[in-house]
Image: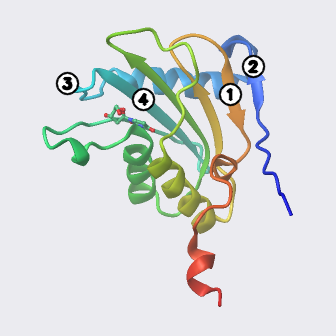
Amino acid sequence: MRRTVQIAFTEYESPDVLSPDDRQLLAAAEQALEKAHAPYSGFRVGAAARLSNGLVVSGANFENAAYPMCLCAERSTLAAAVSQYPEAHITTLAVTAAAQEHPVASPAMPCGACRQVLLEAEQKFGKPIRLVLRGQSGPVWVFERATDLLPLAFGPDMLRSI
Ligand code: THU
């Protein structure tokens, strides 16, 4: 039997048509990107998380001369949010990126590792994390839950299943 997995998301032609909250969050991610430490790749990523307590926590990628040690913006932001506000959950995460070498005109997609970590966060919160993703220009892609980006994932349930 052949099975298919579909991923649904909404494309907005520009941030102008987003809700004020999402537009503001994307702007916070753009500001966060300015704080990136990306001397090796020249690829700066900014993220901003809106929390259930109304606060916004942001973060950026932080690279290391030992390349595999690089911290992604999404995971830096998640770590900051859950460690500072463990009682809150993330309702929406906006992510954006800018490259030194070329314009980033397509949405900043979280890497596989970040998708895995966001999945765990969603399961811990018991609530979806909306994703609002954009490059320096171009459309905005909105996913209603982070797990939509990681179908057929390995997760906590696998450890309990027989
Ligand atoms: N990066 C992120 O911050 N998030 C992602 O989801 C993908 C990649 C960073 C890591 C590294 O500093 C740079 O982008 C190039 O890979």
Image-based side of 37 in relation to 65, left or right: right
Residue linked to disc 2: 12
Three-letter amino acid code at the position of disc 3? Pro
Q: 160 or 60, which is in the foreground?
A: 160
Location of residue 71 (image quadrant): top left
Instruction: Tell me which numbered mark, 4 or 2, is placed earlier along the sequence.
Output: 2
Q: CA distance from mark 3 to mark 2?
A: 32 Å
Image-based side of 155 in relation to 112, left or right: right
Three-letter amino acid code at the position of disc 4? Gly
Three-letter amino acid code at the position of disc 2? Tyr
Question: Measuring 49% from the left and 35% from the top, which residue is drawn there?
Answer: 48
Residue linked to disc 4: 46
Residue 39 numbered tag? 3
Residue 60 numbered tag? none
Q: 66 or 136, which is in the foreground?
A: 66
Q: Horizontal and vertical percent for residue 36? A: 30, 28
